[in-house]
Image (tube, rainbow, N blue to C red):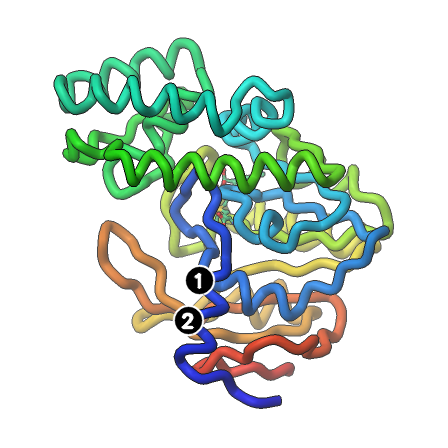
Amino acid sequence: MVQATDSEVKNAIEKVHVPPIKTQGIKTKLVPWISQYASLDAQTVWVEPFMGSGVVGFNLAPKRALFSDTNVHIIDFYRSIQDGELTAASCRKFLESEGARLKSRGGDYYYEVRDRFNESHDPYDFLFLNRSCFNGLMRFNRQHRYNVPYGHNDNRFSKAYVTKIVNQVEYVQAKITENDWEFLAMSYGDAIDASPSNSLIYCDPPYIGLTSTYYDTWDEEKEKGLHDSLMESGCRFMVSSWAHNDYRSNELIGTLWSDCHVSYADHAYIVNGKHKPVVEVLLTNYVTEWRGGVVLPGRQDYRR
Ligand SMILES: C[S@@+](CC[C@H](N)C(=O)[O-])C[C@H]1O[C@@H](n2cnc3c(N)ncnc32)[C@H](O)[C@@H]1O
């Protein structure tokens, strides 16, 4: 196994396609590392019960997949693409006209769209808010109303930025059309129960003890429920989690998850514009073989 040079790593990360909807905890830079452990053939069903942005599954581009999340707006967004209601061309038109309104009316317009979205749940408005809000956050209050403040950039939807988003929609649109993918709003337990035995289930739950709200809260009971459902499923699975940061350790890796194989990687998430280093883990219920591709430097990779 030969460790990759900095430029090989940069290339591998640059090849990752970033999806149109962003969320905190997005795995963009970890896709090359996670992919090394995911062996898929034409029969494998990729199940991703915490899809968030979907960046991992979208880049692996499985033939068959179930993407799910409790955040119904993410699911609605991708179903709109699948139904042909939301296309790259219609997105361009929408973002150009709404971007012009944002440019002339600034924050007042952002909050008008936010109120509108909280009533109508329109996927176009969801995209607009996701790409013009503060720090690209995905956050809802207890009544499930989107509550992220304005990102304070009236010229957010410049021509180049609209083109970037449109290309991201176009990429996902092509993958959805080429493959047999399903998008469902459901809790992880229902997604795991619905997984056929030839599934590879990839779970990226909110990081216990580290996060932050997404759409639903996460606690030890849910993490235990996740562990037990995966173990009972009879399917192969991978779970992303964290081992430790500069201040704390995740005890559950050595207790609840002690029956899994574990691989480690150095990573840093950007939280409120700041780099937060963390030792990332990938837990699997199968012994993973290195399947080629780059080995990212600075990443320890061993089994216990
Ligand atoms: C860490 S994010 C996933 C990030 C994703 N892997 C990415 O790269 O963008 C966790 C996701 O889990 C979802 N979630 C939280 N609780 C859930 C539950 N009980 N069942 C299913 N999804 C849940 C959140 O809405 C959020 O989208």
Measuring from the top left, give residue 4's x and y in whole percent.
49, 83
| Residue 249 picture quarter | bottom left
Q: In the visual, does 187 lie left or right of 114? A: right
Tag 1: Cα neighbours inside 10 Å, few (<14), some, or many (≥20)? few
Residue at mark 2:
10
Q: Is any atom of residue 248 visible in this view?
A: no
The residue at the point 35 percent across, 33 percent down is: 130
* Cα separation between marks 1 and 2: 6 Å
- Rendered image: mark on residue 14: 1
- Seen in the picture, residue 228 relative to 33 is either above or below; the reply is above
Tag 2: Cα neighbours inside 10 Å, few (<14), some, or many (≥20)? few
The type of residue carrying mark 2 is Lys
- Seen in the picture, residue 21 relative to 32 is either above or below; the reply is above
The type of residue carrying mark 1 is Glu
Measuring from the top left, give residue 116's x and y in whole percent.
33, 11
**Quadrant holding the C terminus:** bottom right
**Quadrant holding the N terminus:** bottom right
Residue contact between numbered discs 1 and 2, judged by CB atoms under 8 Å = yes
